[in-house]
Amino acid sequence: RRYMEKVIMKAARTDNGYCCSCDIITGWVVAYTGDIDGFKNYVQESVDFWLEGRREKGEDYPKVFDGEYELVYDFDIATLLDYYRGVFSFSALQTITGINQKQLAHYASRVSSPRPKQAKKIKVGLRKLAKDIEMVTF
């Protein structure tokens, strides 16, 4: 069985929307004004347009795009926390991540940036929550 390849999109929130880049698409950057769903659609359209241009000109591009692939968004910590604070209180996020809620608030507002170990702890906590929710049946 063949698995769908994942293409990592490094994404972040901006004042008016979102932006992202991708390590395997050299020089490609996207900025979008609007919500997250519109952003994801815009990114897919932009990648499709970029690929079409490369193919038409006979230029090289990453071969991952020849098969089935999925765009996976790797949001920076401030963006993740900013998004989830609209869903959970910082107290709940403290329980989920194991990091003090005051510190989480500083990360979300970009007053400070987490060390790599702290960033990983936050992402692991949120992934665990997602897996726990996925296992719930209704």
Image (cartoon, rainbow, N blue to C red):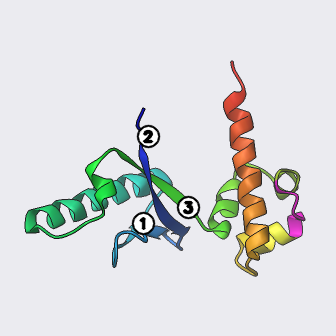
Residue tagged 2: 3
Name which residue lies at 37% across and 52% down: 41
Residue tagged 1: 33
Q: Residues within 10 Å of mark 2 (few under 14, many from 20)?
A: few
Q: Residues within 10 Å of mark 3 (few under 14, many from 20)?
A: some
Name which residue lies at 90% across and 65% down: 100
- Vertical order, 129 against 98 (above or below): above
User: Does 28 sit left or right of 84 as displayed?
Assistant: left
Would residue 129 be seen by someone viewing this image from the given angle? Answer: yes
Of all residues shown, which one is farthest toward the top?
138
- Residues at marks 3 and 2, CA–CA distance in whole angstroms: 20 Å
Residue 76 horizontal/vertical position (percent): 61, 68
Q: Amino acid at mark 2?
A: Tyr
Q: Residues within 10 Å of mark 1 (few under 14, many from 20)?
A: some
Q: Which residues are magenta?
A: 97-102
User: Does 84 sit left or right of 66 as displayed?
Assistant: right
Name which residue lies at 30% across and 54% down: 65
Q: Quadrant of the C terminus?
A: top right
- Vertical order, 44 against 108 (above or below): above
**In front here: 72 or 100?**
72
Disc 1 versus disc 2: nearer the observer: 2
Residue tagged 3: 74
Q: Amino acid at mark 3?
A: Asp
Earlier in the chain: of badge 3 and badge 1, it is: 1
Circle 1: element type: strand
- Residues at marks 3 and 1, CA–CA distance in whole angstroms: 18 Å
Would residue 85 be seen by someone viewing this image from the given angle? Answer: no
Circle 3: element type: strand
Residue 69 horizontal/vertical position (percent): 37, 48
Name which residue lies at 21% across and 69% down: 60
| Numbered marks: total | 3
